[in-house]
Structures are given as C-alpha cells and as structure tokens.
Amino acid sequence: MLSLPLRPAGDAPLSVLALGAHPDDIEIAAGGTLLHLAQCHAGLRVRYVVLTGAPERQAEARAAARAFTPGADLTIDLHDLPDGRLPAAYGEVKEVLEGVARSVRPDVILAPSPADAHQDHRTVGALVPTAFRDSIILSYEVPKWDGDMARPNIYIPLTDDIARRKCELLDKSYPSQRGRDWWGKETFLALARLRGVECRSRYAEAFSCTKLVLL
C-alpha cells in the first residue's frame, strides 16, 4: 500500500472544506480526520458548510465544528434547507455550493458520497464535483440503517486517542442524538476498527476518491 502525504499547494496552510447535508454528518464520517489534521497542520483552514438544520441542531453543529477543529482558522456556514427533501431543493443546494466555490479554493473537500443511500447525502455528493473541479474530493461514509457501506479506496489512519476523542466529542456535541439506537461509541469505533484493519492501522476513517492527479 502506497502512503502519500496530504500537503497544500505552495506555502499556504492546508485548506479543508467540510460539507454536510445535516448537522453531525461531518463529524460522524470525518471527525477523526479533522482532529488529525488540526493536530498535524499548523494554521489549518477549515470551512464548514451544513445544508439543513433546525435552530437547536444548528447550535449543536456550531459547537461541534469548533470542538473538532482546535486551533484551526474556522469559518462556519449553516443553512436551513428542508431536511429529508434536498432532492426537491436541488437548485438551492447547487446555489449554496457554487457560492462557496466562488469564495474558497480548498485543497481537500470532505463530502457525502453520490452513492449514499440517504437522498440528502446523495444530492450533495452528486453536486460537489460540478461546483469544485480543482480540489481533492474525498467522499465519506455514514453508517445507517440502510446498510450502504461501500468499498473505499482512501484511508486516514487514526491513533487510539483520536478515535476515542472523536466518540467523546460526538456525544458531547450532539445530545439530541443520544437516544437513537444506532448512536454511540460502539458503532463509531466498530467502523473505525474495520477500516483500520483494511489499512493496517488500529483505527481509520475511509473515503472514496474518483479522480486524483499524481505529480
């Protein structure tokens, strides 16, 4: 397995755009990655964009964004498009993403997969490549009842401390989700452990990338 360092172009700090259809999508799928990047990259720049969310959920998302990017230069954009109905709001989703694309050129984008079983995730994932054409797009995975886990091709190893810190911050940041039968560190650590096995690490988060230029 070939390991490639994640570095910004030129001398600027690494710039990351994290996109979520709902509050908690980003942290469930890539919270460990954000914690890892914040630890490894001085001056990390992170732009958070979440498409849906009632006021209570938006407050949770704002707190989570800050907790998962300690020390980073963080910008947070929260929108209130209709939860569960983003396919019907296709034009509005596209407008939000294109607006972000006009204001930032990230090195790396963390986004839902266009193959995700959830219609909101799938809509965002399908539109990301149309708005961003010069960034690495890492499509993340979110465990769910639908059982749509795919075969990833990009792995980011996580230390034990980061994997467990992710679980702690998820529970602290999103109290509204604690009663759900799928929520909890057993779910999050189980998936991270499986992905770790696949890349010879204790824990990992996994992504899919459909296009990558190697120089």
Image: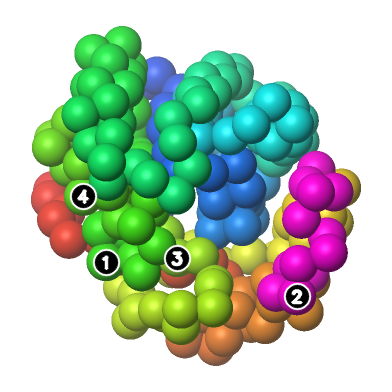
- Name which of mark 2 and mark 4 comes first in the sequence: 4
Q: Which amino acid lies under the numbered mark 1 shown in the image of this protein?
A: Ala
Residue underneath mark 4:
126
- Name which of mark 2 and mark 3 comes first in the sequence: 3
Quarter of the view holding residue 74: top right
The disc at residue 115 is: 1
Q: Which amino acid lies under the numbered mark 4 shown in the image of this protein?
A: Ala
Mark 4: secondary structure: helix
Instruction: Calculate the distance from the C-alpha at mark 2 to the C-alpha at mark 3.
Output: 18 Å
The disc at residue 181 is: 2
Mark 1: secondary structure: loop
Mark 2: secondary structure: loop
Residue under the image location 46 percent in, 78 percent down: 146
Residue under the image location 63 percent in, 48 percent down: 24
Q: Is residue 158 above or below residue 55?
A: below
Q: Are marks 1 and 3 in contact (CB under 8 Å)?
A: no
Residue under the image location 57 percent in, 86 percent down: 194
- Please provide the residue range marked out in magenta: 173-184
Instruction: Calculate the distance from the C-alpha at mark 1 to the C-alpha at mark 2.
Output: 24 Å
Residue underneath mark 3:
141
Residue lying furthest top in this view?
103
